Amino acid sequence: MRSLIAVILLAVIGLGLALCLSDMPFGANHIATAEKAGRHYLEKAPQETGSANVVTAVVVTYRGFDTLGEVTVLFIAAIGLGMVLYRRKKQEGKPPQPASFVLQTGCCFLFPLILILGVYIFLHGHLTPGGGFQGGVIVASGFLLAYIGCADMKIRHRWFEATESLAGSAFVIAGMAGLAAGGSFLMNFMPKGNFNTLFSAGIIPIIYIAIGLKVGAELTGLIANLLERAE
Amino acid sequence: MVNPVLLLAVPLGLAFLTPLLAFISDRIARYVPVAGMLFNCVVSVSLIPSVLNRPIIVQTGGFAPPFGINLVAGPLGITLAAVIALVGLAVSVYGLAYVKEGATVKYHVLYLLLLTGATGVVLTGDIFNLFVFYEILCISSYALVAYSGDKNGVEAAVKYLIQGSIGSGLALIGIAILYGVFGTLNMADIARNIGSTGILNTTLFIALAFMVAGFGVEAAVFPLNAWLPDAHSSAPAPISAILSGIAIKVGIYVVVRIVFTVFGAPSMFMLLVVIGVVTLLIGEMSAFSQNNIKRMLAYSSVGQVGLIVFALGMATTGGISGGLFQIISHALAKSLLFLATGYMIYRSGSMEISSLQGMGKRMPLTCCAFTIGAFSLVGLPPFAGFPGKFMIVRAAIAQQQHLFTFLIALVLFGTIIEACYFFRIVQAAYFTGPREEPDAGKQRREEAPLFALAPMLGLLVFIIALGVYPEPVIRLLDSCAAELLNRFDYIKGVLG
Amino acid sequence: MSFLFENSYYIAAVGLILIGLYIMAAKKNLIKVIIGLSFFETGINVLLIAAGYIRGGSAPIFSHPDMQAGKMVDPTPQALVLTAIVIGVAVLALALSLAVRLYEHHGTLNLRKIRELKW
Amino acid sequence: MQIILLTSFGGAFATYLLAKISSRLRDVCAVIVSGLLVVFVALLYNKTPAATLIPSFVGAPLTVRLNMLSWFFAIAIVVVGFLSIVFSFSYIKGKERADFYYLMMLLVNAGMIGIVLSADLLTFYIFWEIMSWGAFLLISYNRGPALRAGMKYIVMSVIGSVVMLAGILSLYAVYETFVFSELAGRIASASPAYSLACASMLCIAFAIKNAVVPLHTWLPDAHSEAPAPFSAVLSGILIKMGTYGLILVLYLFVGVKLFISPTYVWRGFRFVLLVLASITILVPSFIAVMQNDAKKVLAWSSIAQAGYIILGITFGTTLGFAAGMFHFLNHATFKALLFFGIGAVEYRTKTRDLNSLGGLLKRMPITFIAVLVGTCGLIGIPLTNGFVSKWLLYKTLILEGSPFLAFIALIGTWGTILYGYKLLHHVFLGQLPEKYKNVRKAPASMQFVLIILSLAVVVLGILPGIPLKLINTIAVSMGMDSMNINIFGIASETGALNTVNILSVLAAAGIVVWIILKASKKSTRISQEDNYAAGAAIPAERYSYTVDFYNPLYRMIRRYLRDIFDEFYYWIAGRVQAFSDMVRRLYVGDVGCYAMYILLFLSALILSQVWWRVW
Amino acid sequence: MLATVQNCMVIALTVLMLAGAVCACIFKDLISAVIATAFVSLLAALFFFLLHAPDVAMAEASIGAALTTAIFVIAIKKTARSEEE
């Protein structure tokens, strides 16, 4: 009964969406004119920000404020998860079963490689696809692997907390520096450098490093919290 | 002049720093929200005079509005930011005393971020940025509702989360449609593209419908508000106060901003009015026969939301400034009520109204605060609720339409019901319970601690001050109403 | 057929959104509901990216100096979707942690049975 | 003027704060404040100051002014207020939360002063509400059944103020002003339907406060459950704020010319008011006869007496107006007196049940005399002020050709005699129950109040010219004909009234009766125990008390005197409650359902657009 | 020709994706449902790639397909695995 009503309602909503989508045909060039933001980004991003990856330019500079908010959301999720799963007394759970030897060795072998990959991705965010988030997630998945595989690995939460706190503050401080130096928050006030090289694009790599570290630390903390609760 | 972006950057930075500070000492971390809100309070109040003439447009990243994200510190935004900071300050001081158990540092961080999210929503001029701040607000409130970790808190948080994420998802669909049609995310730019057609075409209307339904969840208008009674009644007292006082107001702000400024859709105004009345009636009626006091207050918030939406939907200067005044007075009064109730429940150990017996003797000051808050909500002079209700009714009658006459009758009926249940509680607090000899009362007095009383009394002073001399605020709100009504001024102000 | 060719991305997006909403409205199990939520969010992301696609465009990265800005897809939705994905995972993580807590309290995740707060 | 308001409000809070230091200081402060108010108001006699309190409050100034009408009401308020505070002295001593009690007493008083002083509807409304919620807190003060009474009162009061708000704002919507004097001129030219609508809304609001019959149900409970001093204020003054409001509406806004004009609309309106007023006299008078709670008797009597006032005022002629206004003043004195007297009895005996009281004549002589005087005034026995006003009223009714109404008013007076005597007898005459053997006299502060008011009743009865002169000035200022007043009454062809003549006639009659009594056989005193009981001594607890005093009458009229309105209101309240409970079921607690609500809302919006294109 | 093949492929992917979603809806075993979810996420990442959004594709693949699944599995481990009680 409920499913039926739901299907009917969703049919109506689907109809509405379809009507909308017929107004924005797939693949049409909706940013043809110059005053559209998308066109502006494509044409001006290399000069204005010095980043080869326009998406990165948009994420970090044009819509940097969004990114700050997004980092905050993740921060909230990490903290909120810790709060929800907070336990007054730390109970001693039974020690986790050690993983099989193959898994353990594989994890320990892969762990540094994954970390390096993650760091590479967020360092090259302004040049190649990827950036702070993707890199951070990859770092976190490395830690996930370590948690699963190397059961005896204990990383203290405080380090993650310190990292995310520092990285977050670094983001805000970079923004404030922009405000102080250029008169507007998150201003890309540093020299742009040579286009398409690692040391270019002003504060973008710096912010992306901060984001990468922060996202990595947050997601790791998140997983660690969940896992701890599990055992 | 201070840059309004600091209203967001400073609390954000403080929130990020808090875990570090907590390494040094938990005591320092506790005072971070107080510091952040104090800062916001000072800054936003000091900004009010300068934004009255023309809004301050703040660019981020140094890019001109349609290309970068901009903040629009107009009268409306700054006024709401000031209210948020003010109520936030009071509640954070209260939290110092109230929040003792559990992950206190995390609580304070989330609390500060919740208020930052709310401030961001009212200040931003970019619709996706609005969505992001809206999510900050929502997600931190999901987590905070479950702060105590008890059965009801977690259940309420789960329900809130599910409904809230459906809402934000729908809103994001609306934003996606708008972007697909216009290729821009700046609210002023979208508004300029929509123009002043009056009647929207189907696509735009559906985008609007998605956004109203989505953001309406946080605004708690009738069919979308089922999370509210659960969440408000199960959260810890300061969070209930913030949710009722601030969070739903921000939701209302978003809906109104979208309907008025972005779409300029006069055809939606009537819908708002009708939804408002229905919400009001359902909220007040549901509150009428509640035995759980926090749930009753929560339903009363639903009713008040209805009243506010009704007022804003009238789309006249009088109606809007009445609605905004009601937002302020309700924010003050309802957070006061929740704060007072928090300690009453703490002392009596039960949320049943019958357990409030004799509270007037046990905690006289808290009870007095509760009573005045209740009177203010009912709209009795000389408290802040009166000018708001008065202006709303005046604006509705000034419409001089039969429909409005009918609706205002329903609204007043709702007010009567509201008066009934609030007076019942006031009676229960003062005039029931064991009769005591005047001398014996001294040793049984268990007043709330000073840190909890101070913010209550602060809010009380504001309620009475607003009730006795509302004129400066009304003048401010009139310019807010003008900002909402003249969308072309807004567009011109942002895009030049 | 050409309709399908033209709009298959949209169909996928809308389909995901609707299935997600259906799961959220009609399913009893909280984990299922959260799965529905993740579909819903994925669907919106696909919708946004599809809306930003420009026929014949390339990825908005100047990996070679001779690339032209006119031949690129719109980067804005991609930035938005990046944000939306992260927000989505944040909500998801929080929801799952709440589910764990809920299970500890009620011993079930059946939402029809978890109805202490009502009326 | 501002000083008056400042004293009244500031004094209330000062009293409360001082009470935290010592209760002695509190009493002194309360008396000083209320005494100062009497002085201030008295000093303002025949002056017409005006002032602005707040230059702009929600877009309109808050202004106050004083004229003869408001002075007339104000002096009654402050005097009764002062006396009630003095009376409270011993009444409230030793009860819980006395500080709060004083605060509220003074606050309600301040609110009422504000009402009569206000020069515009907005100010009026604000003070009206302050008075209303203050009274609510005071009515609930006694706990127990008082809670129910308080709820009933505040619900009806809120309904009233909501209706009033609607009325005020309907006026504002057209004329864009709240000020009385500006409104007064403009309404006369409005369309009859519109002004009738506004006038009836305001009248409903005032009728609730004034307890005109279909809207009276809060009053009996509230009056009987409130603390005695406040009952006096409530009955004597507070409900008369409704009268003040009615006078404002009928004589100032509508204008007396229009009100008694023979147009269809206004004739009908006036007719309805007159009928309601006469019902208000008739039915409650007999319900009062039936009550066994001393304060309930007085409460119902208040409704009936308010009916006389309304009858006089709605009549619209100078004489009627004078009758109404004078009766207001008289009612304030003698009803306050009665409440104070019964309060004193209650204070000493801790009960108000008429059937268990009796024979207190010897124990509390001063109280007895006061209640006797009050009852005489209530009934309208010559030489008390009640006689004068009732005489004026009958005169008006008969002269203006409404003998039927006069007849109803007379029947009401019979009822008054019945319950007045019942009250007097049950409390003070008959046998003294054992347990009240040791009842002491009322405390001095109470006796002081009782004596003052008794004197006022008699003085006003002998020298009615003092207030009538004032009333005449008011009437003239509102555009009515003048009367020819002298200190002993009215000298005119139509309604000559001279208390000197009456006094002499009465004196003569008294002498005759006394002579007859002297000449006839001397009465013998008989001991209480000396009645026939088949030889056995009657145990003390078996004394015959008068329980079913008017049993035959009671059996006769009981059937017609159910308070159907009260039952009806309870029925409505029950329905609303049941319906609210049903509405609450909407929140089923299942989050899937809630998700469906959201989808339903969205799809309804989309559907309405796609199919009907409504937006 | 190439375009047609690609179009057909996209249609096939769409069908697969929706089928995966429906499967996730139907499966009583929550772990299977989560695997189906991961599959859908992976396909979504592929879609993003096809729509020339490599950044998003990376994010979706790493977050949607890997991290989310891990969190889901951990959470299911701590609660009940089967949908029915």
Image (cartoon, rainbow, N blue to C red):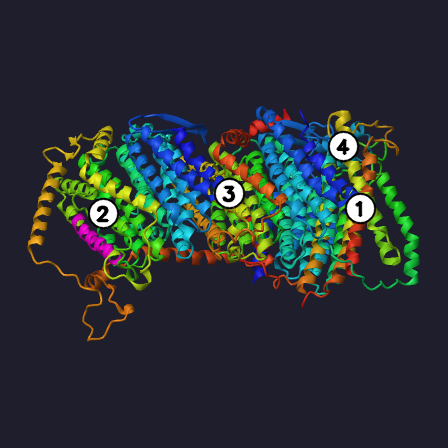
* Residue at numbered disc 2: D373
Real-space Cα separation, disc 4 to disc 2, in angstroms? 86 Å
Is B24 in front, or is E55? Answer: B24
* Residue at numbered disc 1: A161
Q: Nearer the viewer, mark 1 or mark 2?
A: 2
Q: Residues within 10 Å of mark 2 (few under 14, many from 20)?
A: many
| Kind of element beneath mark 2 | helix
Tag 1: residue type?
Glu
* Residue at numbered disc 4: A175
* Residue at numbered disc 3: D20
Residue D357 placed where, x, y %?
29, 59
Q: Earlier in the sequence, mark 4 or mark 1?
A: 1
| Residue B177 sits in quarter | top right
Tag 3: residue type?
Lys
Pointers 4 and 2 in contact (C-beta within 8 Å): no
Real-space Cα separation, disc 1 to disc 2, in angstroms? 85 Å
Q: Nearer the viewer, mark 4 or mark 1?
A: 1
The magenta stretch is: D409-427
Check if residue D418 falls in the magenta segment. Answer: yes
Real-space Cα separation, disc 3 to disc 2, in angstroms? 39 Å
Q: Earlier in the sequence, mark 3 or mark 2?
A: 3
